[in-house]
Image (tube, rainbow, N blue to C red):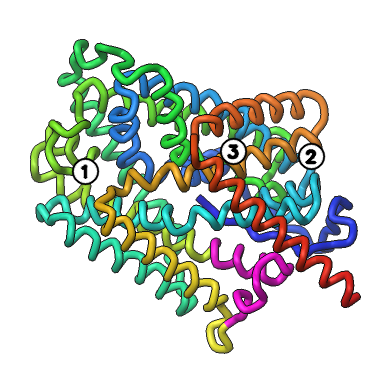
Amino acid sequence: MRAHALPRPRRDARRRVSTPTARLRRTVGLRSAVALYVGAVLGTGILVLPAVAAETAGPASLVAWAGLSLLSLPLALTFAALARRQPVAGGFTAYIVRAFGTRWGAIAGWLFLAQVPTGTAFVGLLAASYLAAPFALGRDAQFVIASAFIVLAYGLNLLGLRLVGAAQAVATVGVLGLVVVVVLASVRDVRADAFAPLAPFGWPAVGFAAVQLFWAFVGWEAITPLAEEFHSPERDLRRASVLSVGIVAVVYLALATVTVGTHAYGPEASGLPPFARMAERALGSSALVAVGIAGGLLCFTPLNAYVAGLSRLAYALARSGDLPAWVGALHPWTGVPHRALGALGVACLIALGATYAADLHGADLLPISTSSFIATYVLSMAAAVRLLRGADAVLAAVGLVACVIVLAFVGALVAWLVAVAVAASLYSGRAHRAIVREA
């Protein structure tokens, strides 16, 4: 998950963005691109979503995994095509601005920010559940740990400190290694009767599971700002997209199949987090410490970078007049958008407190966050349909239709998305009219 800054509003938002004279060094090859893609997509979801989806749709959740894996191909190829054909700084929101104007860019930015409180609370609770697993800590302790995680992530960013990407790479490789070991060790425990009945909660539940699982497939857009650094973008972007989708699909489907086949989910399972439960069953209780540390690190390292990106998005929106100017202030010592960080941090802690008071779990927060992600992907695919031509536009249209179908399953949350979009549109329109009057 990454936040992308919005460009300043322009009188002609659709004209070509000027490029600087100096060019970035071309250092990204095929293997590096695949590593970047896989690292951007595989993340916190791998630790919990196979069990969450199985609880929602039963064995039929595998259909949702397969469907989203297939959907990932046109999504990844479309973002790769945008990076090749329509190079522009600013990430996916910049494509939306180019295609539809600054107001739609503001809507995309607001929708992305709307998922911050619940998304951050979910990641904090997930990290806490894994760190607490070796010590059998209860619900209250986990919420305290989650609060500390959130405060630490925002505090480090307020100080202008970020964890290096190497920490994320180490955590990702470590968890992937554990996934491979646990899956191979768990195959012997897979039972055929665990896949029956296939759809105990009905087939519509597969759609609801897909909404939850969308969290695990966010990140295909992260490669777009790096297109200029590829040795051969025309060749390697498409190849890297296909290879990465294949790797991600195999990892997710293997873990989801073993989760269902060993019935490592549901209220009858132990109180451990899903992946920790499987690791203990396959490798013994000694594996809990390794899983707990790796899980906590895998959650915290992207959260730290995620917070940094989101604060810059809020800063950019304030700078362009799409959020109050107060939000865009920079700290005189550290140069970070401290007010944006403070406001987002408080919102995240409020969401965490509300989750505790309502006796909810982290997974209950997922639909709110994923619905916002799906909506921004719908806007991105619509922009791609307008900006691309030929086969690339067809792929974008396929991705658009598929995302709209998934969006249809968010249910009453559509009202929330519409409310955010309307608020963003009204605020952006008023702010830009004021800019025109001043000009």
Counting residues from the start of the chain, the first of labels 2 and 1 encountered is 2
Whether residue 219 is visible to the viewer of this picture, yes or no, is no
Q: Is residue 223 magenta?
A: no
Asked if residue 363 lies left or right of residue 189, the reply is: right
Residue at image mark 1 = 273
How many dots with numbers? 3
- Residue 30: mark in rendering: 3
Structural distance between the alpha carbons of marks 3 and 2 = 18 Å
- Kind of residue indicated by mark 3: Leu
Residue at image mark 2 = 85
Give the overall secondary structure of the magenta segment.
helix
Residue 306, compared with residue 184, is above or below; it is below
Identify which residue is drawn at 24% across, 60% down: 143
In the foreground, 394 or 411? 411
Query: SS for tag 1?
Result: loop
Identify which residue is drawn at 38% across, 48% down: 365
Q: Which residues are magenta?
A: 309-330
Instruction: Residue 258: give x, y in percent of width and height.
Output: 26, 24
- Kind of residue indicated by mark 1: Pro
